[in-house]
Image (tube, rainbow, N blue to C red):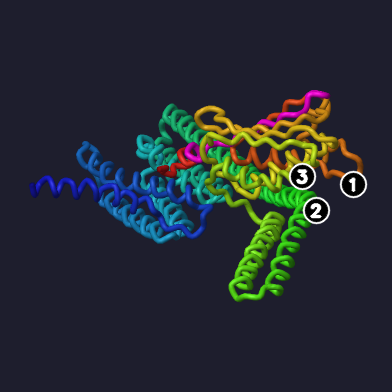
């Protein structure tokens, strides 16, 4: 048990150590990738140094004291560069690595010449070339020039020994030219690759800025669209309030007449019980008048949508007096609401606004009377259908195609804003529903609305339902 616990802790500790090792401290975000690459070069060089020294020691050539000293100096430099890199000093670490490596290579080429370095030349020169490239373009080409000079120095050192062998001098010259050509070509390819990378990064940064600006513009446009939609809804509410004003005033006058009548009866009463009854009737009539005025004020108030779960059948039934006021005496109002098909989640004030808009349009289409019918049906397992049908003059195909456009109206100037159906369609679609209109000249109009059931909306949002 103890061994398994220890193994589990060590396995869990390993990823954390790896994350801590990768989490370099960086002051400049632009050096993030360069610091990771330099760290990889330093670690690889530090691992290769003792292996190379051990192989040379085991070979027949052996290792002299100068090689051991240079290896110790190189290891100390690599560890110091890693320490600087871990503390966020990327530039200092890269400069230390390049400077010390070039100094050690200079001493090696002066002491041993070019030929002894040939087997490990690639492993010696590529890391310092990468370090110079990480410091910048000028540093990279300065490093290349230094390496070319070292090849020349090493070749001159070997040529002094092989002066009596012309054939060996030709081989030495070919080796020098090959090394110089290889360094220059490697530096050129690396320079072009880094230049392309810088251009791609600049392009990506520019594209990112453009996308951010486009996102900001889109957000502003969406906010402006929401603000305009709210203004359209409020404007349509004001139009509905104007249509209801005369009917509300009519009811309010009736209620005031009742109040005055009950007050006169109270003054004429001769007993305390009769006076108390008259006061109760006055209070009842006043309460009904306050409810009428409060309902009109609540409807006209400009507020954000407040969805709630309610029974559309009960809501429409409560609107019967308001709907009745929008039609002439010769219009028959029919509400087919039972049995109720279920509950919906919708802003109730907006629901009333939609029905009042449909009723007002139907009233305008039936100036001499007719029939206005509102029916509720189950439009599938997740939708509730609301049908508003009238016997008015109807619409032709062109008007029917454009009737949902904002500000489109066939009414004379000053008698309509063209916002009613457009606002109604926007509110229904924003709630996940749909609206369709069937109409023909002389055959009336049928507006079919489908709203999601409350249970289906809660299920999509992950809200548990009873």
Please provide percent x and percent y for residue 80. Answer: 36, 59
Dot 3, how many residues are within 10 Å of its Cα: few (below 14), some (14-19), or many (20+)? many
- In the rendered image, residue 441 lying in the magenta stretch gets the answer yes
Residue at 41% x, 51% y is 101
Residue that numbered label 1 is attached to: 414
> Is 105 positioned to the left or the right of 219 in the image?
left
* Span of residues in magenta: 440-457
Q: Are marks 1 and 2 in contact (CB under 8 Å)?
A: no
Label 1 Cα crowd, 10 Å radius (few <14 / some 14-19 / many 20+): few
Foreground residue, 115 or 95?
A: 95
User: What kind of element bears circle 2?
Assistant: helix
Please identify the quarter of the rendering in which residue 320 is found.
Answer: top right
Q: Residue at x 42, y 53 (%)?
A: 97
Quick check: can you spot residue 240? Answer: yes
* Mark earlier in primary sequence (1, 2): 2
Residue 399 screen position, x and y as percent: 82, 29
Residue 201: image location, x then y, percent: 59, 43
Total number of numbered discs in the rendering:
3
In the shown orientation, is residue 391 left or right of residue 76? right
Residue at mark 3: 326
**Spot occupied by residue 91 in the image (x, y as percentages of width and height):** 48, 57
Q: Mark 3 or 1 closer to N-term?
A: 3
């Amino acid at each position: 048990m103890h061994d398994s616990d220890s193994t589990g802790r060590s396995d869990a500790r390993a990823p954390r150590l790896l994350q801590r090792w990768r989490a370099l401290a960086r002051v400049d975000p632009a050096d993030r990738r360069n610091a990771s690459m330099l760290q990889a070069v330093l670690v690889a060089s530090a691992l290769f140094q003792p292996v190379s020294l051990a192989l040379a020691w085991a070979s027949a050539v052996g290792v002299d004291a100068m090689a051991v000293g240079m290896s110790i100096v190189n290891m100390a430099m690599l560890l110091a560069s890693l320490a600087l890199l871990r503390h966020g000093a990327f530039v200092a670490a890269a400069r230390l690595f390049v400077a010390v490596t070039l100094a050690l290579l200079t001493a090696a080429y002066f002491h041993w010449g070019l030929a002894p370095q040939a087997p490990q030349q690639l492993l010696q020169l590529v890391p310092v070339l990468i370090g110079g490239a990480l410091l910048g373009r000028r540093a990279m080409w300065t490093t290349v020039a230094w390496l070319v000079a070292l090849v020349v120095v090493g070749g001159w050192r070997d040529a002094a020994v092989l002066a009596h062998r012309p054939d060996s001098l030709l081989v030495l010259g070919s080796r020098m030219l090959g090394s110089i050509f290889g360094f220059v070509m490697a530096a050129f390819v690396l320079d072009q690759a880094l230049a392309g990378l810088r251009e791609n990064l600049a392009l990506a940064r520019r594209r990112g800025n453009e996308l951010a600006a486009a996102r900001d513009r889109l957000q502003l446009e969406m906010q402006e669209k929401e603000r305009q939609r709210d203004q359209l809804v409020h404007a349509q509410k004001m139009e509905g309030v104007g249509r209801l004003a005369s009917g509300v005033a009519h009811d309010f006058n009736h209620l005031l007449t009742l109040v005055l009548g009950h007050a006169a009866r109270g003054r004429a009463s001769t007993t305390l019980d009769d006076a108390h009854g008259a006061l109760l009737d006055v209070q009842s009539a006043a309460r009904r008048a306050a409810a009428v005025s409060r309902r009109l004020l609540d409807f006209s108030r400009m507020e954000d949508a407040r969805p709630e779960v309610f029974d559309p059948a009960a809501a429409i039934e409560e609107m019967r007096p308001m709907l009745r006021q929008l039609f002439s005496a010769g219009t028959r109002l029919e509400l087919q609401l039972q049995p109720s098909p279920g509950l919906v989640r919708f802003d109730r004030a907006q629901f009333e606004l939609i029905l009042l808009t449909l009723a007002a349009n139907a009233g305008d289409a039936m100036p001499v009377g007719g029939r206005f019918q509102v029916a509720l049906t189950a439009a599938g397992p997740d939708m509730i259908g609301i049908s508003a049908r009238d016997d008015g003059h109807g619409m032709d195909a062109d008007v029917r195609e454009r009737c949902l456009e904002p500000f489109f109206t066939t009414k004379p100037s000053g008698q309509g804003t063209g916002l009613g159906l457009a606002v109604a369609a926007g509110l229904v679609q924003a709630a996940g529903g749909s609206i369709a209109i069937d109409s023909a000249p002389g055959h009336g109009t049928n507006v079919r609305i489908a709203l999601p059931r409350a249970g289906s909306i809660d299920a999509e949002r992950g809200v548990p339902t009873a």
